[in-house]
Image (cartoon, rainbow, N blue to C red):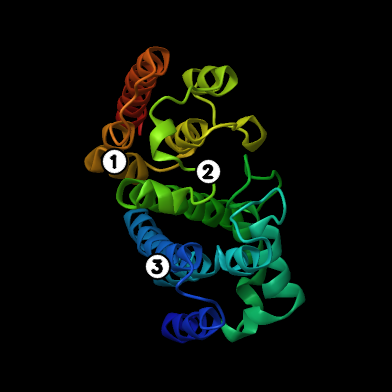
């Protein structure tokens, strides 16, 4: 069985190895606990067993464990340099760290698959029903907490290397990013050229939400309006495109929520 309190204690001990004054480290710790909370909410809403609720929380606790070493090694959250999900799998299963968090190995394959797939463009095919379920839960929970972080964190902390207050208001949106959003598609990392592209990539997370409770969370927190309105758009073309994105997103959420 899963002892989540023991796992949480092991996580706290693990992150003591990293500089909590680093904005990225501090943000990832807060994000981890936010994802744990959202995973529990989703699992309970789905009516899962207590065992699967605890498993969902454990996966959430571990889903970004590769981020800490990534930030330490490359000084940024950059999956092009080090894929944090794959690095997390290495730490947990090749280096054996997983046993610090759960003694029973019966959950290993589910944890492995869920973490490996949590940051991918699409979930891999061929998963078992329970592997697919937990992959969907962690993907939704991760996205929901990223919405929360983007609403509350200072932009210069979110983009420490690229944010410039005097220029972001005049940024443009890459055409490919805009067109993919309007087609209800998530944004590929290689297509992101500007901070606004990154912002739209986040908004496009709605197109990959799997559960009604996740869509309800986005609607209740009004994340679409709040995130779009965080920036004052002084480029007229960008301003018009953002209004089209707002309309597209809200119509999509309404349709999806009514269907679910």
Residue 162 lies, with reference to residue 70, above or below; the image says: above
* Circle 3 residue: 33
Instruction: Identify the residue at horizontal 77%, vertical 74% (top origin).
Output: 94
Crowd tier of the residue under label 2, counting other residues whose Cα lies within 10 Å: few below 14, some 14–19, many 20 or above: few
Judged by depth in the image, the label closer to the viewer, 3 or 2, is 2
Q: Is residue 201 left or right of residue 153?
A: right
Residue 186 visible, this orientation = yes
Measured as percent of width and height from the top left, residue 58 is found at 49, 71
Whether the residues at callouts 3 and 2 have beta carbons within 8 Å, the answer is no
* Circle 2 residue: 162
Mark 1 or 3 closer to N-term?
A: 3
Residue 39 lies, with reference to residue 57, above or below; the image says: above
| Nearest the eye: 197 or 37 | 197
Q: Determine the CA span between mark 3 and mark 2.
A: 27 Å
Q: Determine the CA span between mark 1 and mark 2.
A: 32 Å
* Circle 1 residue: 216
Crowd tier of the residue under label 1, counting other residues whose Cα lies within 10 Å: few below 14, some 14–19, many 20 or above: some
**Secondary structure of the residue carrying numbered label 3:** helix
Instruction: Identify the residue at horizontal 50%, vertical 67% (top origin).
Output: 25
């Amino acid at each position: 069985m899963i002892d989540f309190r023991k796992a949480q204690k092991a996580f706290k001990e693990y992150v003591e190895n990293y500089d909590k004054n680093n904005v990225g480290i501090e943000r990832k710790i807060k994000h981890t606990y936010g994802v744990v909370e959202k995973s529990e909410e989703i699992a309970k809403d789905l009516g899962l067993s207590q065992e699967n609720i605890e498993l969902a929380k454990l996966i959430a606790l571990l889903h970004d464990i590769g981020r800490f070493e990534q930030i330490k090694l490359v000084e940024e959250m950059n999956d092009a340099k080090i894929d944090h999900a794959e690095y997390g799998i290495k730490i947990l299963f090749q280096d054996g760290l997983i046993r610090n968090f759960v003694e029973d190995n019966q959950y290993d394959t589910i944890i492995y698959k869920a973490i490996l797939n949590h940051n991918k463009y699409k979930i891999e095919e061929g998963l078992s029903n329970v592997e697919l379920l937990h992959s969907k839960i962690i993907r939704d929970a991760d996205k929901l907490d990223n919405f929360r972080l983007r609403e509350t964190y200072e932009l210069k902390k979110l983009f420490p290397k690229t944010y410039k207050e005097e220029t972001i208001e005049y940024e443009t949106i890459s055409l490919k990013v805009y067109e993919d959003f309007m087609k209800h598609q998530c944004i590929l990392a290689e297509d992101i050229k500007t901070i606004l592209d990154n912002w739209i990539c986040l908004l496009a997370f709605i197109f990959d939400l799997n559960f009604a409770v996740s869509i309800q969370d986005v609607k209740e927190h009004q994340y679409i309006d709040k995130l779009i309105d965080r920036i004052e758009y002084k480029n007229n073309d960008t301003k018009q495109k953002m209004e089209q994105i707002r309309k597209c997103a809200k119509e999509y959420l309404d349709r999806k929520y009514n269907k679910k």
